[in-house]
Image: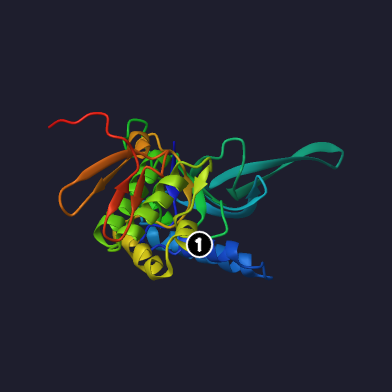
Amino acid sequence: MGKFWRAPKPDTASPIPALIQGYAASRRQPGQFLDVAQSVARGLFDYQTGAMSAGLLTVMDCTVDGRPAFGILKLEREGGLQLEQGVRDGRRTYDMSVLENLVLTDGTRLFKSALFVKTGSDLGDFDGVACDDQRPSGSTDELAQFWMRFLGCRLKEEPRVSTKKFFEIAVRYVNDVVIDPVEKNTIYEHVVSELKSQKKNFSPKRFIEEYLPPEHQQAFTDFLGEHHVPLRQFTLDISAIERRLRRRSFHTSKGVTVTVPVDDPTIVEVEAERIVVNDTVTKVGA
């Protein structure tokens, strides 16, 4: 049973997201991986209770499709017998040894696992998947609460949800915070243009740096944070707002509303004290 995650959860007390982010962002130093693995082990020990099944922790530095990745496994601790055949005094003999803490045998159970993969250049650009094989078959919770807290992550939003949330909060910022009418229109045009682009992924942080005036960059960043919109990139999916992106409405201080298709930006010109509609009237009516 698996769940995809976004790291980190804003209010997490877990050390795992910071450990993984810091390790992936740094140049590998001798002994660094051992330090990180020990910190992960201590973190797991702190989050477990006496009711948890005993297990062995495995931490892996790996790559996925050429991208840095970090794996965490909690394995069943097994015991077994080792049988070795020998000859003594001309007779065939068998020596039997008891082995403890066996792992990765054919019957080893993988209690819990998580894999984090670096997806971009920003510190928080990680995707992850987690699995919990100790949940009852009829359980509606696919991951134990302690495992969720230990990983310090939350459920990843679907791309259509992330796209819609950014669009709505960006429009709210334009309407509630931006005062200048020309700036309102310009920023909104950039939002629509970027969301409708052919890009596969969208980075709010990069959007802010490239398209917002300097005086709005920090304010918009804070506004996104207040409304729980992260700066990490997400996959674009405008299916939930596609209809809203086809047309744009202008609402004036005197109660006039003008709705135009967004594909022709020349229809309406927005100035500081007026808007100009460059079109011909074909019908009138109440």
Name which residue type carries label 1: Val
Does 227 sit left or right of 207 as displayed? left
**What residue is at 50 percent from the left and 62 percent from the top?**
40
In the rendered image, residue 221, in percent from the top left (x then y), is placed at 38, 63
Q: Residue furthest right?
A: 90
Relative to 58, does residue 197 appear above or below in the rendering? above
Q: Nearer the viewer, residue 246 or 59?
A: 246
> Is residue 16 something that shows in the picture?
no
Q: Which residue is mark 1?
A: 40
Does 284 sit left or right of 108 as displayed? left
In the rendered image, residue 22, in percent from the top left (x then y), is placed at 54, 66
In the rendered image, residue 122, in percent from the top left (x then y), is placed at 53, 60
In the rendered image, residue 33, in percent from the top left (x then y), is placed at 62, 64
**What residue is at 48 percent from the left and 63 percent from the top?**
209
**What residue is at 37 percent from the left and 51 percent from the top?**
188
> Is residue 92 something that shows in the picture?
yes
Does 224 sit left or right of 72 as displayed? left
Q: Nearer the viewer, residue 273 or 120?
A: 273
Q: Name the image quarter holding the C terminus.
A: top left
Q: Nearer the viewer, residue 83 or 169?
A: 169
Q: Nearer the viewer, residue 118 or 223?
A: 223
